[in-house]
Amino acid sequence: MKHIVIVGATSAMAHECARIWAEQEATHFSLVGRSAERLQRVADDLKARSPGSDVTILATDFLSPEAIQATVDETTSNRRIDIALIAHGSLPDQNNCQIDLNVCADSLAVNGLSPALFAEALAGKMEDVNYGSLAIIGSVAGDRGRKSNYSYGAAKGLVERYTQGLQHRFAGTGVTVTLIKPGPTATPMTKEMQLEGTNLAKPVDVATAIVGAIHKNRLTIYAPEKWRIIMLVIKHMPSFIFNKLNI
Amino acid sequence: MTPLSSWGRLGAPLHYTVSLSREKISEQLSRPPLPGIAYGMGRSYGDICLNPRGTAWQTTDLNNFISFDDKSGILHCEAGLLLRDIQNVLVPRGWMLPVTPGTQLITVGGAIANDVHGKNHHRFGTFGDHVQYLRLARTDNQIIECSTTKNTDWLAATIGGMGLTGVVLEAKIKLRKVDGPWLETETIPYYSLEQFFELADSSEAGWENTVSWIDCLGGRQGRGIFMRGNPTTASPDLPPRSKQLTMPFVPPVSFFNKLSLKPFNTAYFHLQARNAGRSITHYQPFFYPLDNILKWNRMYGPKGFYQYQSVIPRTNGLEATRAMLDAIKHSGEGSFLAVLKTFGKRLAPGMMSFPMHGVTLALDFPNNGPHTHQLFKQLDAIVQEAGGRIYPAKDARMPRELFESGYPHLEEFLKYRDLGISSSLSRRLIGS
């Protein structure tokens, strides 16, 4: 049975990925999150959808390096990992980050430092057995700093650079590392954007793209794919134009 | 504020939308500044799910399975789960929802609030007949658990309760065993209403599913296509489903209009009549023929459309149906997606359930303004005189007297009303 580790398993996107995997075949899931109660609900959902699957839940502190290492050690105590998906994050209000450095520090830690530490720990386990697919959810926001969300974007930029490093390190080995950069998606995280009536991608469509990218060992994908073109334009726009845009 | 519409696309009024989340639900529902209404997939046709300038609690994030017991067939799930997801997961395991309407792209909560029915009413009743437990949140922060043994009055009020008794959070539904996804079906053309009733009556004993398409412009006799189906153990080597299509744009005028309707209907009748006979069909195209075309409601153009679904007690069924078809023909309005079917003799599970022993006629009309409403008035008079009622899930315009005469348990139902909940429909038909 495949062993899939999902960090931030209660996030809407990760949960949708888990449903797809569970409905494909019976799987052993290790679900990592902050709240055991919320993890249990995801576990119940997966078990009802896929009675052959079994689920272990691991509640942990996402900001403590020791707790992260201990959690990852626990996931590999009995079996090696086929796929690990790192999906946690939270979208802070940029204004609050500017007013209150605690909010800013939280965002940088939860969206940047924490996924990087999980990635490092999981990559170590995969290196030991020279096997596994590691996927990390970044964001289009990490492609270029913008005034509307740079405290989030900078953290996602860190994730991207870290992932690049891992991809370089594991090139030509049995370990693959995939970076997923979703555009804005209709999840609880983007509630505020949804209120403004923005037309966002559906979590299930993004999840389908994620599962497909991992299956094909892609290096970097945008989900939906149209964001590759949009971000190509935004990344290469000269500053004297970019800085006049209200985005 | 976000524009929301229902399936009829008669408008897109602004709502204050709140995506319900498991962790915050009591806070999200408690004492809303503006009364709210639960909004699932927006697949009801009229204003039952709309609350312009008010709150719309979106339920589709509450889409978890909680448990499924492979021995008893009891599914425990959250109310925002889609019927499609239930079918996709459980049909391969030999279980199916006993009752589903003509689309599976609806939430469990919506199926309960409208007490939806399907093609097998004479055998399986309504969706509510299979609901064994509900967890209901009220806007005063109370949680009411009701089941077939506990707080049964709350269960009866909430099934078919138009979402007005609280927000359904979770439900337990008893599924039925099936041998597979296939149905043995038979298609029979009929050339008069009498022939339709004969077919419907003679099929009740031997066929689980019966439905018919009626050519509402086909004249006094009422010609149509009768379809019936039974689950089968056969498993033909067929691809289960063709490609998913989407109606990509809203045409400037309705595809169905005075010019196009008659040839459409005639062509459809003869095409189907040519395919008459028995075959093996997958449950999806049989039960949900239009789910393959996403956003098909756009075909009615920018002004949207009305759906008129009535049920007439059996004794008056033939004359009233004939009178309605006459009225439609004389009005020059017409309907392509016209469905005629009989309901069996069963007690409805909800105080406000729509189905009763009789015959139901469902018609789509492009919104042609006053002219369409003129026709509805004539149809209303026929329904009221025949002792029938209109289906709130489809309605955007019925007069209050007709609602009151059609639903004799209304007064009792109102005792269970949550006053923090209100919809366009409740204000129109109940006054608040």
Image (cartoon, coloured by chain):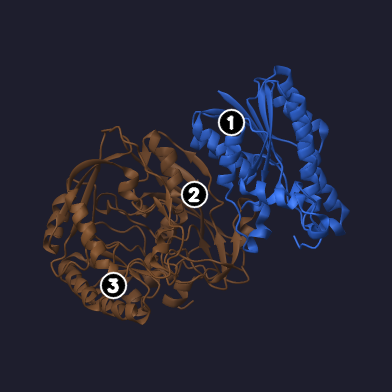
Chain colours: A blue, B brown
List the single residue furthest toward the top: A129
B262 sits to left or right of B101: left
Of circles 3 and 2, which is in front? 3
Read off the chain for label 1. A
Q: Which residue is mark 2?
A: B81
Asked whether the residues under the numbered discs 2 and 1 touch, taking CB atoms below 8 Å apart as contact, a structural biologist would say no
B116 sits to left or right of A165: left
Give the residue displayed 26% in from the left and 56% down from the top: B346
Q: Which residue is mark 1?
A: A215
* Residue type for callout 2: Leu
* Residue type for callout 3: Lys
In which quadrant will I find the N terminus of chain B?
Answer: bottom right
Q: Is residue A15 visible?
A: yes
A88 above or below A132? below
Q: Which residue is mark 3?
A: B258
For the residues labelled 2 and 1, the Cα–Cα distance comes to: 27 Å
Read off the chain for label 3. B
